[in-house]
Image (cartoon, coloured by chain):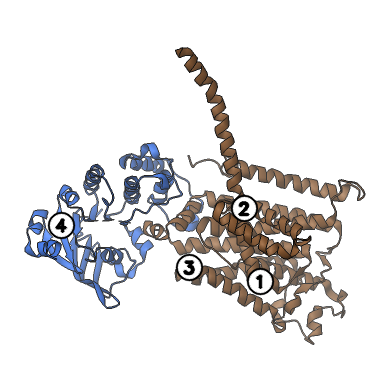
């Protein structure tokens, strides 16, 4: 029953995930083709700004996945997950800043523009190494991972749960926002890091670079998805669910609840950090507003609307809500977007506890019942016919 | 096992625990022999649940000794440690993992390694698979094995939880009001089940239901205001004037 091979375990009896992978594959092949090969005057041409936009949605989908892993499966409601996303983003941003070199406004080969502007004479020690891509990638994992480890170790060991945990995660991201806003922190103050030129020598404005980043984002989203799928379907995943449903019961069975929470919290933070690192080169800026608690709350709304506790639900929710956001914030509804978002959240919470995915599931189940009824009906006819 | 050498599987001596000045447990002493089935009764507030909390590491006593297998000082360990040493606990309110199936609930409780990475790469062996099936059969949930635990009746949840306790293969089972909310038939079945478990485990049962206690037919300890009021067979303790006073006298 639970002894299927890994691949089968990940894909079997999970239609929704299979569909998600098919859509991602289509995007991964179709979008580069329609952007690079199809001529710009063609009706089918996908402009680069759309590529970037979809890339942004995919980064958010990864972030939603990260939150769903801890909230949907382990009951840890983090209202500060944007912090891990932003830290990953800053690590990548610092590399991109160093790549600018002497092409900045002030032409300083070492110091980024904002440091020259602040009259700094030398590079702060924590910027060392960021001219190396490998080091920057290492920091993309280390910074969010370490923060998650320290925070989680303290919070879970002291058995902080529920709303109290949510509040301190919120405080965490708020504190980081305030810190990053300060000019003397050395992260560009409220302007953040921007004006990036290239990545690994490739021009960030070039279509081909954009496409590569886009495809990389898809690949990492797929990897993160498979990782989460593996975790949630292993026995450890069932321990997480049992922590969510009955924490003390899980302790009395003999599981170290704090170890499981810490593990999944770190995995989640790492996924969020990678999402942030992929987001920054595509969007071209990272600033302290990414630490804004409101952003973190928005992630919770994506997951809730998509369907908490199903991985594909988180992905669908993030894409749908952000698509709606792009649509509504550019038209006549712009002023009302936050009200719309709030209303969506309230409606989902009250009427659709399982989110959009719940509606889809319900539809397919009804269809299945109808079909099986249709199959059963003729048999019933035969039976009654036999009687008469 | 070296049961021969062990005097007491569980030994409480002079245990006291106060909450905001209220003495929930007051100089409590208790001695459970290996393989013993012991029933503990007492009115509400007698300290039964606090006693369970102290044994299982949820609460630390203010003073007194809590020894497991003669030598292990339980006050030094937490819930997970104590569970892994072989003390299983069933709660008063049936606590099963509602959104997992009956089978998954038992698999989760199955004796084995509890570390994150062990469970992450866990594969069920044939022997373990059979063990889960055996326990499902024992607690009478065979035809509901794939049902989500939330869809079980109250009595079935109680049994599932008892099953989860047995499958951990503990040496000592602490069972808190297993018959609460059960029909008379279920109550008697539960008593039978516990008696059969006690053949190769030590069991401590806390219960209110006198018919159930009678069916267990074993040594009874009466708790009152956090300490032991009387001890002996049910007939002996129920003819004890102090016990009658506590139960009926107010």
Q: For numbered disc 2, what is the local secondary structure?
A: helix
CA distance separating discs 2 and 4: 55 Å
Residue B191 point in image, percent of width and height: 22, 47
The residue under the point 57% across, 54% down is A308
Chain in brown in the render: A
Residue A386 point in image, percent of width and height: 47, 13
Mark 1: give few (<14), some (14-19) or many (20+) Cα within 10 Å.
many
Mark 2: give few (<14), some (14-19) or many (20+) Cα within 10 Å.
many
Label 3 in the same subunit as label 1: yes
CA distance separating discs 2 and 3: 27 Å
Within the image, what quadrant is residue B235 found in? bottom left
Taking A77 as reference, is B14 left or right? left
Q: Chain of mark 4?
A: B
Q: Chain of mark 2?
A: A
Q: Which mark is residue B220?
A: 4
Q: Nearer the viewer, mark 3 or mark 1?
A: 1
| Near-viewer residue (A382 or A120) | A382
CA distance separating discs 1 and 2: 23 Å
Nearer-N-terminus badge (1/2): 1
Circles 3 and 4, Cβ within 8 Å, touching? The answer is no
Measured along the vertical axis of the image, is residue B8 above or below residue A290? above
Circles 2 and 4, Cβ within 8 Å, touching? The answer is no
Measured along the vertical axis of the image, is residue B77 above or below residue A241? below
Q: Chain of mark 1?
A: A
The residue under the point 35% across, 48% down is B157
Q: For numbered disc 3, what is the local secondary structure?
A: helix
Circles 1 and 2, Cβ within 8 Å, touching? The answer is no
Q: Which mark is residue A306?
A: 2
Give the residue pinned by disc 1.
Answer: A291
């Amino acid at each position: 029953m639970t002894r299927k091979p890994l691949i089968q375990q990940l894909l079997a009896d999970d239609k929704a995930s299979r569909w998600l992978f098919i859509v991602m594959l289509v995007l991964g092949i179709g979008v580069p083709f329609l952007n690079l090969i199809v001529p710009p005057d063609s009706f089918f041409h996908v402009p680069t700004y759309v590529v970037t936009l979809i890339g942004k949605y995919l980064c958010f989908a990864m972030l939603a996945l990260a939150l769903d892993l801890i909230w949907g499966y382990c009951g840890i409601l983090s209202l500060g997950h944007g912090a891990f996303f932003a830290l990953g983003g800053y690590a990548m941003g610092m590399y991109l800043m160093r790549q600018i070199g002497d092409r900045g406004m002030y032409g300083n080969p070492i110091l980024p523009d904002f440091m020259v502007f602040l009259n700094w004479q030398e590079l702060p020690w924590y910027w060392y190494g960021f001219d190396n891509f490998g080091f920057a990638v290492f920091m993309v994992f280390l910074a969010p991972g370490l923060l998650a480890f320290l925070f989680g170790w303290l919070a879970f060991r002291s058995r902080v749960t529920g709303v109290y945990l949510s509040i301190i995660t919120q405080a965490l991201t708020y504190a980081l926002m305030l810190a990053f806003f300060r000019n003397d922190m050395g992260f560009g103050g409220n302007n953040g890091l921007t004006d990036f030129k290239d990545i690994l020598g490739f021009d960030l404005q070039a279509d081909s670079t954009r496409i590569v980043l886009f495809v990389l984002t898809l690949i990492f989203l797929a990897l993160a998805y498979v990782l989460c799928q593996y975790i949630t379907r292993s026995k450890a995943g069932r321990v997480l669910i049992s922590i969510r449903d009955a924490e003390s019961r899980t302790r009395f069975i003999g599981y170290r609840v704090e170890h499981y929470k810490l593990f999944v919290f770190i995995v989640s933070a790492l996924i969020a950090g990678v999402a942030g690192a992929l987001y920054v080169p595509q969007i071209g800026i990272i600033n302290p507003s990414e630490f804004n608690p409101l952003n973190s709350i928005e992630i919770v709304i994506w997951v809730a609307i998509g369907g908490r506790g199903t991985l594909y639900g988180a992905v669908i929710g993030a894409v749908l809500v952000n698509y709606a956001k792009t649509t509504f914030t550019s038209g006549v509804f712009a002023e009302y977007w936050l009200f719309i978002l709030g209303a969506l959240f309230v409606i989902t919470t009250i009427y659709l506890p399982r989110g959009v995915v719940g509606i889809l599931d319900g539809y397919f189940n009804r269809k299945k019942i109808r079909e099986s009824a249709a199959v059963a009906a003729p048999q019933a006819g035969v039976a009654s016919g036999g009687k008469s | 096992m070296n049961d021969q050498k062990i005097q007491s599987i569980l030994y409480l001596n002079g245990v006291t625990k106060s909450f905001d000045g209220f003495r929930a447990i007051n100089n409590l002493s208790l001695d459970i022999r290996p393989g013993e089935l012991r029933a503990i009764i007492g009115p509400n507030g007698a300290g039964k649940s606090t006693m369970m909390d102290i044994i299982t590491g949820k609460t630390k006593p203010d003073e007194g000794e809590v020894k497991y297998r003669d030598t292990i000082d339980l006050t030094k360990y937490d819930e997970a440690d104590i569970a892994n040493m072989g003390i299983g606990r069933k709660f008063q309110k049936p606590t099963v993992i509602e959104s997992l199936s009956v089978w998954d609930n038992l698999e989760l409780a199955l004796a084995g390694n509890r570390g994150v990475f062990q469970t992450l790469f866990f594969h069920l062996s044939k022997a373990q698979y059979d063990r889960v099936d055996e326990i499902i059969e024992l607690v009478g949930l065979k035809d509901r094995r794939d049902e989500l635990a939330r869809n079980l009746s109250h009595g079935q949840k109680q049994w599932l939880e008892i099953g989860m306790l047995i499958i951990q293969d503990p040496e000592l089972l602490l069972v808190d009001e297993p018959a609460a909310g059960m029909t008379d038939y279920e109550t008697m079945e539960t008593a039978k089940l516990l008696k059969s478990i006690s053949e190769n485990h030590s069991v401590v049962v806390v219960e209110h239901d006198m018919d159930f206690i009678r069916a267990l037919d074993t040594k009874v300890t009466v708790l009152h205001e956090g300490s032991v009021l009387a001890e002996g067979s049910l007939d002996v303790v129920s003819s004890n004037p102090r016990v009658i006073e506590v139960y009926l006298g107010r």
